[in-house]
Amino acid sequence: MTTIPLPSPAVAGTGPTNDLDATYRKITWRLIPFLFVLWVLAWIDRVNIGFVKLTMLDDLKWSDSIYGLGAGIFFLGYFFFEVPSNLLLQRIGARKTITRICMGWGIVCVLMMFVKTPAMFYFLRFLMGVFEAGFYPGVILYLTYWYPSERRAKAFGMFMSASGVAGVIGGPLAGTLMTSLHGVNGWAGWQWVFLVEGVPSIIAAVVTWYYLTDRPQQAKWLSPAQRQLIEADLARDRASLGHREESLLASLKDGRLWLLILVFFCVIAANSSLTFFGPSVVKEVGFTDPATVGWIMALSYLFGAIGMVINGLHSDHSKEARLHCAFAAALGAVGLLCTSLFISVSPVLALVAQTVAIIGTMSAIPVFWQLPGRFLAGAAAAGGVALINSIANLAGFGAPAMLGFIKTQTGGLAPGLLIVAAVEVCAAILILLFVPRFVNKAAGK
């Protein structure tokens, strides 16, 4: 068996430490901005229906129930294809896998402009989930090839904050396109949104093929000394974590995996509700102009992105992930609760509460992904991360469908938001009551 020598105490002084930090900075500047842009594109293409809904439903004579089911059915595609995609990534590499994913979701986004019937809407949303499946957990797995555990929360936070930045960009962009291009070439404004936002993803797929590097040892943009430093540091990290399950089938019998699935399910229920119905909350409190709605959501997601990065940085600095995840989820639940209470009372308080919900919910996500790596490695990590994300994202199907149904039946969003708040607080409770047992055990404490 080949072993990688670890730095000895005699040479692990300031110089090598500085070299290692410099190498990780180089990796970060090479990988994170590019992956960040890809996730921005993916997120915009995924959630733009939350904005086009403001006029699309009226044009096509659809109900909120049809919209809610179509918004959520995306996650069924995720559920069926995410684990196979991540296992394929481990086998053929991130470059080929992410190229395929970007090309697929970009094409489907463009095709969405031709939707006329609910059946076509459901089919294309499902197909978008099929194509995008594997990107998010694939990047999580991919970053574990480049960063040791004590540096990952920061990397995850920077990457995942793209969803917040996408909200900052996507809202005003969709609103502007819907108002300024409406009627051009005989197309409605919402049709132009799908076209303009889908094409960049297709272009990004081509760039990915030539830009992305699968593993550190293949990185020609690192010097041989830098590659050796990274491989040694990753070997040190693997050794420090001790034995971890590497068999996917064996990991399926581990209750810890299913506990994390349940925790993330609760977080995703809140996140998907805010994503697909956040603009509807803004409209319900009195702002009907698409561009105005976009700018209001942009401000909320700007704070959400900042929260993700700060929580990830503090988690890395304190070497603690459990409480950072639990308290962020609790904050998100409080924000949702207050949104449901204030939505018919005070527009300002409702929008502030929704922003708090976005900050808390989004900030819980990057530090959550520190937990599976404490007891999974190899194929178990590849399949386990994808399994957690795919099953938990069924909440992304159920929550929007539930909110759409309740909105249709009651004419308001408050009852549905109250239910989602109760679900998210369960995530914090589960983490505080049960996660410490296996985290401490995995860490050898």
Image (cartoon, rainbow, N blue to C red):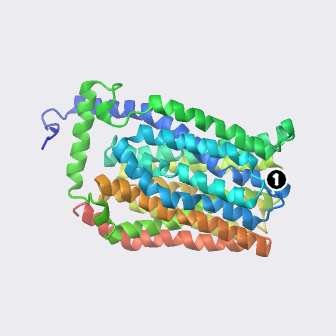
Image quadrant containing the N terminus: top left
**Residue 78 x/y as whole percent:** 52, 57
Horizontal relation, residue 232 to residue 113: left or right? left
Residue 49 visible in rendering? yes
Q: Is residue 245 left or right of residue 349?
A: left
In the picture, residue 255 is in which quadrant? bottom left
Asked whether 350 or 136 is in front, the reply is 136
User: Residue 56, image x and y in percent?
Assistant: 80, 53
Residue 396 x/y as whole percent? 58, 62
The foreground one among 123 and 194 is 123
In the picture of the structure, the residue carrying the numbered disc 1 is 55
Where residue 46 appears, x then y in whole percent?
A: 62, 50
Number of residue marks: 1
Quarter assignment of residue 104: top right
- Note whether 258 is above or below 77 in the view shown: below
Residue at horizontal 79 percent and vertical 69 percent from the top: 344
Residue displayed at 69% across by 64% down: 68
Say which quadrant the C terminus sits in: bottom left
Residue 27, quarter of the rendered image: top left
Q: Is residue 208 above or below residue 345?
A: above
How packed mark 1 is, by other alpha carbons closer than 10 Å (few <14, some 14-19, many 20 or more), is some
Amino acid type at circle 1 is Thr
Q: Is residue 97 above or below residue 275?
A: above
Q: Secondary structure at mark 1?
A: helix
Residue 434 as seen in the image, left or right of residue 37: left
